[in-house]
Image: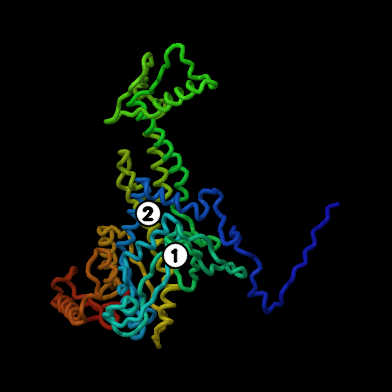
Amino acid sequence: MRKELQLEIDVPSQETADFAEYGASGLQRYAGYVREEFLPQLQWPRAARIYQEMESNDPVIGAVLYVCEQLIRRVTWRVQRGGPNREDEEAAAFLKSCMHDMETSWNDTVAEILTMLPYGFAWHEEVYKIRTGDSPDPRLHSKYNDNRVGWRRLPGRAQATIESWVFNEEDQTILAAVQVPPPDHQMRVIPMTKSLLFRTKYKYNNPEGKSLLRNAYRPWYFKKHIEEIEGIGIERDLAGLPVLKAPEGVNIWNKEDKVAVQIRTTAESLVRNIRRDQNEGIVLPNEWELDLLSTQSRRQFDTNEIINRYDQRIAITLLADIIMLGADKVGSFALANVKRGLMGVALESIAYAIAEVFNRYAIPRLFKLNAFPGITDYPQLVPGQIVSPDLADLARYIQALAGAKMPLFPDENVEEYFRNIVGMPSTQDISPEDRERQLSLLDNDHSNNGQGHPTGVDTRIDDGRLMNEGNPIELR
């Protein structure tokens, strides 16, 4: 008979049951090391050197990462107020000033955060300063002298120097990163409460995330070795396969004869080191013969086609095979637009993931060090669009909305959106006086007997109502 397993379950009271956590994330970790990766060579910290080689040596991977970095660097980051109060506006202005008052520019900081793309994560420390104006002390130097606490810099920590992690055994959260950096190679423990952890993927709260190059590893591995074999083969084809013949009566295979063994070793070294360069030339003893055999560059496999196939797979895994369009003389304009859109959506998700880390951790910590009474909520960091919509399609859409008598202007948010799309100056850069003058000119234009209006009718907004020649329009 099958013996049933008896389990004793400690059931908490109803008051605490709703707040209890029974399971665990299941993250494979031992003694501070994460072992989610099944390939030993891609387990951290060994994986750092492989990803560095892939990033630095492969032209396709290097091009894709460069495009991703430059597209995200050109994003316009705006600060969104936490509420409608004047205090909320002051808090948003303070956050914007902190972004552009660091030792490194905001764009360079974002570029360093983007090192998470090849490595899977980026660990940044928060270093603060007291803003005391133009001080020779870098811990105090600032463009502002309001004595508030701002960001001095947000330096990144090289991924290859992160050895292991410190976890909270109770709730599986990350407490710190253990770093062993050069040149002293002394262990440093960086607490999570003073750091920002950016990850490409959040799974089981794995601090290592997942490298964008992980799925490209297999095609990169085969491509690398095929290229090496191809290079050796080309060199041998150009120089010829060397064949060295010993004189008759000389037995170079006699292992008992030390002289014969030495002669064979010298002969093997000679044929291995034959190269066609400025130092080419061979001196042979009497009756020794050297022949160079050539295959006339014929191969059973087309290595160029194989390497191109692996390049395509590498680009596909990074959602960036748009860079391969045209390289093989295929690909339509419509297909390029689709792939461009997919890549743009993926990069926008990365930008929003960066903003989320700032909004959840960096911004609340910054405002806890500064008194801003009366604010509704903390201001938020919002990235702009990476891929702008087609302007012709957008113009037709706006025209259709206007034809349906939808009031679009004046609306600061809508106007700001359109300005950002075409790269026009922000309304925040326009003085209130100039803004009032622009609105008054628009008002005069609309009230000038319909002249200048696309429909020839004086249609405008008054007290929230759509007016036509001074009479309210009822929308049914």
Residue 418 placement, left or right of 252: left
Query: Which residue in the protein does label 2 denote?
Result: 343
Residue 269 spot, x, y in % from top left: 42, 28
Amino acid beneath label 1? Trp
Residue 277 sits in quarter: top left
Query: SS class of the residue under badge 2?
Result: helix
Query: SS class of the residue under badge 1?
Result: strand
Position of residue 285 relative to residue 159, above or below, is: above
What residue is rendered at 45% in x and 70% in y? 195
Residue 446 placement, left or right of 230: left
Which mark's residue is nearer the viewer, 2 or 1? 1
- Report, in whole angstroms, how far the alpha carbon at label 2 lies from the one at label 1: 25 Å
Residue 417 sits in quarter: bottom left
Residue 82 spot, x, y in % from top left: 39, 79
Q: Residue furthest bottom?
A: 373
Residue 401 placement, left or right of 442: right
Q: Residues within 10 Å of mark 1 (few under 14, many from 20)?
A: many
Query: Which residue in the protein does label 1 denote?
Result: 123
What residue is rendered at 40% in x and 86% in y? 371
What residue is rendered at 43% in x and 38% in y? 225
Sequence-wise first label, 2 or 1: 1
